[in-house]
Image (cartoon, helix red, strand yellow):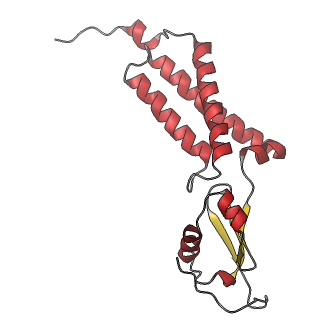
Amino acid sequence: MFSPIDWATLFLPSFNIGEIFLRGSIVYLFLFFLLRILRRQAGTISISDLLVIVLIADAAQNALANQYQSITEGLILVTTIVFWDFILDWLGFRFPIVGRLLRPSPLLLIRNGQIQRRNLSKELITDEELIGQLREQGIDEIEKVKESYLEGDGRISVIKFDSKDKQGGGPKKVTP
């Protein structure tokens, strides 16, 4: 009725542990830097957070689906991915120059009520997307915006003019 459990196959790695660590490291670092170069944003979570979630899920799935010969191999791969995520975060925190390489600096989108079109096109953000983000923050006129930035985590931050700040020109409705 039940077949016996092969404990050696279940827990003893069939691959070299160093190879598993090296493969996990290469894939994680390659994908991290590829995503960092190609895209500044990934929604409201950082690229490394999204990458860790996807890779851990895949690595754990492979271990559960017997893609590896042992659970140990899957656990080593998951540990490798978490290790690199921690190391990159630690290096970025400890060394500001590394942090600037790992996390993009804020990108100016609006200055003194004027859209910075070059920066929008650089990030493939349409006027409609920007205007939608402003509306979500309760801003109905671009001229009310002193500065707006695309932050490193993909969010758009807005600094409004104070009542004492000067605004040029008449109001312009924010519509798509």
Q: Residue furthest left?
A: 1
Q: Is residue 116 above or below residue 71?
A: below
Taking 11 as reference, is 110 above or below it?
Answer: below
Question: Quadrant of the image for the N terminus?
Answer: top left
Q: Residue at x 70, y 41 (%)?
A: 89
What residue sits 56% from the left and 80% below the top?
138
- Give the percent coordinates (x, y) of residue 127: 59, 70
Counting the numbered discs, the total is: 0
Q: Residue at x 59, y 74 (%)?
A: 134
Q: Is residue 124 left or right of residue 2?
A: right
Instruction: Compare residues 135 and 61 and report the one nearer the observer.
Output: 135
Residue 132's x, y, as percent?
Answer: 54, 72
Tell me the residue at 69%/67% (across/down).
117
Say whether residue 78 is left or right of residue 122.
left
- Image position, residue 102 (x, y; %): 72, 44
User: Considering only vertical position in the picture, is 24 above or below 42?
Assistant: above
Viewer-nearest residue: 101 or 38: 38
Residue 157, given in percent of the width and then of the height, sits at 66, 68
Query: Hey, which quadrant is residue 85 in on the image?
Result: top right
When asked about the image quadrant of residue 155, the answer is bottom right
Say whether residue 26 is left or right of residue 135. Answer: right
